[in-house]
Image (cartoon, helix red, strand yellow):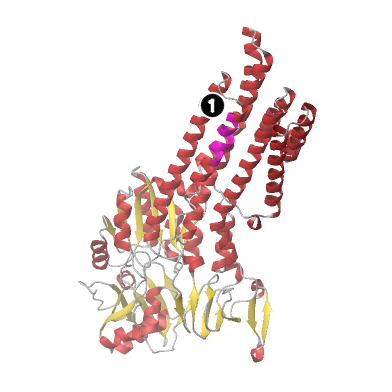
Amino acid sequence: MLVKLSNLNTNQKRQAILAGLGILLLVVGVVVPFPQFVKAGVLVFAYLVVGYDVLVAAGKNIRAGHWFDENFLMAIATIGALAIGEFAEAVAVMLFYKIGDFFQDLAVENSKRSISSLLQLRPDYANLVLAHGKINQVSPSAVEIGDVIQVKPGEKVPLDGKIIEGSSYLDTAALTGESNPVFVSPGQTILSGTVNQSGVLQLKVTKRYGDSTVAKILKLVESASEKKTKVENFITRFSRFYTPAVVGLAALVAILPPLLTGGAWLTWLYRALSVLVISCPCALVISVPLSYFSGIGAASKQGVLVKGSNYLDVLNQVKIMVFDKTGTLTVGHFTVSQLHPVGISSAELLKLAAVAERKSPHPIAKALVQASNTREEAKKITEVVGQGVKAQYQGKVLLVGNAKLMHSQAVKAFVPLTGVTGTVVYVAWDGQFKGAILVADTVKSSAKEALGGLKQSGITQTIMLTGDNEATAKAVATELGVDQVYANLLPEDKLKLVRRFQKTNQGKVAFVGDGLNDTPVLAGSDLGIAMGALGSDAAIEAADIVLMNDEPSSILVVRKLAQKTRQIAQENIAFAIAIKVGCLALAAFGIVNLWEAVFADVGVTLIAVLNALRLVRTKAIPQKQQPTPPHPQAAVEKV
């Protein structure tokens, strides 16, 4: 493994220099024909050069009451070797331990790089536009909602906002893993953390910095290593008992054979020291957490944020995958495709729907507003959860929603639209049914392939839940090959169904969703997966895994990574234990010396670390581009 000195931090440079000096002194002390006492002096000096940090760490831990760690094992083993005159071996053991520790540190840095690179998303400043067009550079946290900021080419977008002036290409790779730039123009909302590539943009800020996309991502990244798997927690507890046990074993090896068989004390003491070196638990303590951390890093390259390594383990256990439809399996870009007015014109029907839905963030509501030319807005707008909205317009009650809303409000002459594929929005005004609007969505291009791949990866059931009508739900389910579909659901219905699936004991249940109404079921499932780019903040907060590119194919990618992570962690555990147990037995019978014991410790650790780093080298998978949806007004003109 070649390492450039210029790429090292200050401490790593110091360690590299000390290791190089230690190697030089070891060679001099062994090869150069100095008198024996000079050789001993050179080797003891070499030992202090390379072993000083270990000895100091062991001393501090002993004073703190923490005796049994790898520093203690290395210190007692090498001091024992010095005591019996094995100077060269004492230096070699400490030197190889330090070299191994150095490369472990580099490996951990490498595994963190994929995740910590996301920390570069953190904006340094925001260009606040003041009166008369003056620009003031301020901290992003000082900007308020409604303020206007300017983003120049090459700058990071510091806050979420809506473009009010300018157009440009954005680099979204850090958020989504997508390498192709995205074109944005006035009226579009863009996320913080992306990089402006070309034109100057002016944004009207829609979220404070603490609530912005970049701030939430940074919070997730910085806490990703806090939630550990059962295996990691077991290894941590195991090492607390393991280390004292092997110290006791080494003491028995040193004392019992000479007492019982009359063997040479120095011979058995040497063997005991070999036992101590071999038994150092570095390979287990370092490589298992590193495997999971590498898995999280590899996932981040795919535009997937995993909030903790424990969620990778849960993903391995998932057997039932439940999907929301809109915005998850479908694009979520709705267009008005049909108008069915009753007693009014098509334009009037669309206007009634738009005035009620103007403030709603729902994709269907946005499609209705964009399809209408009206700038009017209803009053006293109230959301009826899972049904639609109720408002006051021109002094009369205006209802816009699904069939449940029409029935619950006893709308006169209501006739549901049947035999259509798409989402149907019904409109009633002053108690009278005014017609139906059909809003169409398209299936995501990667959805069918992703569902098929999930089946091959061990998912036994794929289920789709939606509040949409049954005809549309079944059409989408048939196209994608979903096993089961449930339509006309309220948010609480989705949660009840997931609870029912969990009680079947057929495996863990994961739910994939994107909307505000998905928050309860995301939190209530065994594993919540949220669409991060288009999904609501509440859904992202409630989820355990966030897909920043909104692609179902990313679920399959991260599941395969989770399976590979578990496999590598298991390989590391089995390999480390097998080698150490074998070498311990050989050391007890004098077949393995201190030099060979170094391989059983440092060598095994390095091999395990390199095995874990296979995950970090996973290349990002290009995402498929979704077709650009037609302008909503065009769809209306065709009706």
* Residue 316 image offset from top left, x and y in percent: 41, 46
Q: Residue at x 29, y 61 (%)?
A: 448
Kind of residue indicated by mark 1: Cys
Q: Residue at x 34, y 82 (%)?
A: 632
Tell me the quarter of the image containing the C terminus.
bottom left
**Mark 1 element type:** helix
Query: Residue at label 1?
Result: 583
Whether residue 477 is visible, yes or no, is yes
Predominant secondary structure, magenta span: helix
Was residue 600 drawn as part of the magenta stretch in this picture?
Answer: yes
Task: From the top left corner, tell me how far across and down residue 34 is, in percent.
Answer: 76, 31
Q: Extreme bottom residue here?
A: 132
Q: Residue furthest front?
A: 33
Q: Looking at the image, can residue 248 be seen?
A: no
Which quadrant of the structure image shows residue 424? bottom left
Is 536 above or below relative to 64? below
Which of these two is toward me, 551 or 509? Answer: 551
Where is residue 19? Give x, y as percent: 68, 43
Q: Residue shown at 42%/56% (left/top)?
A: 521
As drawn, 2 above or below 349: above
621 left or right of 99 in image = left
Sort mark 1 into few (<14), some (14-19) or many (20+) by Cα contacts within 10 Å: many
What is the magenta range? Answer: 596-606
**Which image quarter: residue 623?**
bottom left
Seen from the viewer's position, the closer of residues 467 and 569 is 569
